[in-house]
Amino acid sequence: MKSSLKLRVRTYECDGYNHVNNAVYLHYLETARYEMLKDINFDYKALIALGYGVFISRVEIEYKKPALADDEITIETWPIKKGAVSGIFEQHIKRGEELLASARVTWVSVDSNGAPKKLPPEFDVAGLLP
């Protein structure tokens, strides 16, 4: 499943060149992943209440072209790998059809001590599968 989120670039997210600051892309990607989890009925708040978490262990971003103030961008998110306790999301940030950045984000399911642990069965939803 591919999830899409549209955002408008705000001026305060830009640097002196009017480009979105590279660190802001991490916020965009995180927001889109959270929306994707809601789209697949993954109840993140309930998971935390049970003492689990989903941590990000790796982020790889390839910047292609800058996003600019007031651009409408779309962040697409989809799973490309799922293991016993971890997985990888692919994410693309686009302006129309123009690819601005691509990212691979590795996540891991953890217990209350931060140790890797399988998700409880009710949270191991089909939308996490490639």
Image: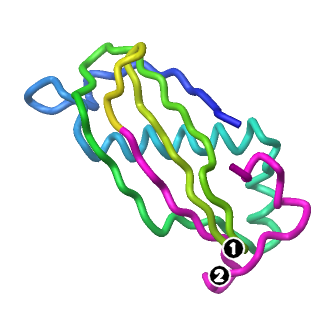
**CA distance for labels 2 and 1:** 6 Å
Helix or strand or loop: what does disc 2 sit on?
Answer: loop
Label count reads 2
Give coordinates of residue 53: x percent, y percent: 67, 68
| Labels 2 & 1 near each other (Cβ < 8 A) | yes
Give coordinates of residue 62: x percent, y percent: 29, 45
Mark number, residue 99: none
Q: Residue at x 70, y 45 (%)?
A: 37
Q: Is residue 30 magenta?
A: no
Name the front one of labels 2 and 1: 1
Give coordinates of residue 82: x percent, y percent: 67, 62
Give coordinates of residue 122: x percent, y percent: 91, 61
Amino acid type assigned to the residue bearing label 1 in the image: Val
Helix or strand or loop: what does disc 1 sit on?
Answer: loop
Q: Residues within 10 Å of mark 2 (few under 14, many from 20)?
A: some
Mark number, residue 85: 1
Location of residue 67 (image quadrant)? top left
Q: Is residue 73 above or below residue 58?
A: above
Q: Is residue 99 above or below residue 52?
A: above
Mark number, residue 116: 2
Amino acid type assigned to the residue bearing label 2 in the image: Pro
Q: Is residue 104 above or below residue 4?
A: below
Q: Residue at x 79, y 49 (%)?
A: 42
In-image side of 8 versus 65 (left or right): right
Q: Earlier in the sequence, mark 2 or mark 1?
A: 1
Q: Is residue 61 above or below residue 52?
A: above
Q: Which residues are magenta?
A: 102-130
Q: Residues within 10 Å of mark 1 (few under 14, many from 20)?
A: some
Q: Nearer the viewer, residue 41 or 79?
A: 79
Q: Is residue 121 magenta?
A: yes
Q: Nearer the viewer, residue 10 or 58?
A: 58
